[in-house]
Amino acid sequence: MTAQFQASTELCWQLAQQTKPNDVVIVGVGTPLASAAVLLSRLLLHPQITVLFGTAVMPQSFSLAQSIFNSHLVSSAAIGNYTQSDVLDLIARGGVTLQFVSPLQLDAQANFNASRIPSVSGETRHLPGSLALADTNALVGRLVAYRIGHNSRFLTQEIAYETGLGAQRRNSGAIHSPGLGVVAAVTERATIGFSSENNSIPVLLNYSGPLDEVVSSTGFGIDVALASERNPVPQEVIDALEHIDPFNVRNLEDKQYRNNTLNDLLQQ
C-alpha cells in the first residue's frame, strides 16, 4: 500500500490541519500518530506553534522511532524540560490550547470513554488511559479526538463509561470549565465537528469515499449539509512524513500494520 493511501498518513494530515498558528500543543510518545501530526504541522503549516512532548519543551530534531524505546532522546533534543508538576500547573492555568486524544468511544455530545469497557463476559475491563484526561478535558483549550477506524464502535450512540464530558453537559451546572472539550473527531474517513450549544447536532466537515458509507458507519446522527469531499494527500505532505517518520511509527496506531511495524522497529 502506497503512502498516500495509508490511513495513518491521511489521518496525520487531517490532524495537522486542526492546529492553529499560536497553539501550545501537548502530545506524548505513547501516541506516535499524533506526534507525527504535530511535527508535520510545525514543518509545513505553523512553524511558530509551541510543542510539548510530555515534559520536553520544543524538541528541535529527534527520531520518532528511537523515542519509542528511549524517552530521554526527546528531552535531550528539547530547549528545556518541565517537571511533571510544571506541566500539570501549565494545564491548570490554561496554558495549553490543544491536545490530541484517542478515546475508545465518543458520542454525539462529545462525551468520551478512555477508561473502561464491559467485556464479553460482562466484567469491566480497565484501559490504560491518558494521564489526567478527565482534567485536561476541562482545562485544555480544545481537544481533538482521533482514531483509525471510522465505525459505530468509536463514534457510538452511547458510551460505556464517562471519562470526560462534552461542553454541553459540563457547562449545564453552576461551574463552567475553561476548556471546550472535544471540538472535533477525526478519522481516516471523515472529520466531524461538535458544538457547545445545547441539543446541537454534530456536523460532518469533510469526508473521503462514498458519503452514504460515512454516514451509515457513524453511530449517531450528523448534519451533512456543508460537508466537502477531501482532496488527496498532497505529495508535499507525503514527502514531509517520509522525513519526519521514515520508519512509519505512526502505523503503530493502525491495527492492520501494528505488528509488522513493531517488528520492523525492533530490527533497527
Image (spheres, rainbow, N blue to C red):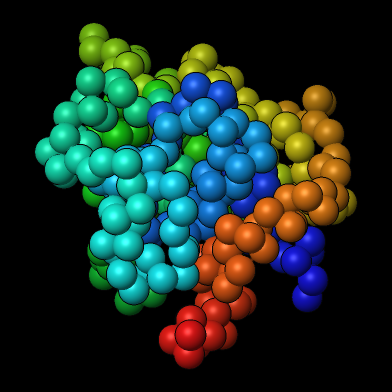
- Look at 23% across and 28% down and name the residue there: 90
- Look at 56% across and 26% down and name the residue there: 20
Exactly how many numbered labels are in the figure? 0
Asked whether residue 115 appears in the rendered view, the answer is no
Taking depth in this image into account, of 6 and 170 the one nearest to the observer is 6
Asked whether residue 35 appears in the rendered view, the answer is yes
Indicate the quadrant containing the N terminus: top left, top right, bottom left or bottom right.
bottom right
- Residue 173 placement, left or right of 258: left
On the image, the x and y values in percent for residue 15 come to 60, 43
Can you say whether 3 is above or below 224 in the image?
Answer: below
On the image, the x and y values in percent for residue 217 come to 69, 53
Kindly indicate the quadrant of the structure image that contains residue 96: top left
- Residue 243 placement, left or right of 31: right
Determine the residue located farthest toward the top in the rendered image: 174
- Look at 17% across and 29% down and name the residue there: 89
- Residue 66 placement, left or right of 147: left
On the image, the x and y values in percent for residue 93 come to 23, 20
- Look at 82% across and 42% down and name the residue there: 230
Taking depth in this image into account, of 78 and 232 the one nearest to the observer is 78
On the image, the x and y values in percent for residue 227 come to 80, 31
Taking depth in this image into account, of 90 and 243 the one nearest to the observer is 243
Can you say whether 171 is above or below 218 in the image?
Answer: above
Taking depth in this image into account, of 25 and 49 the one nearest to the observer is 49
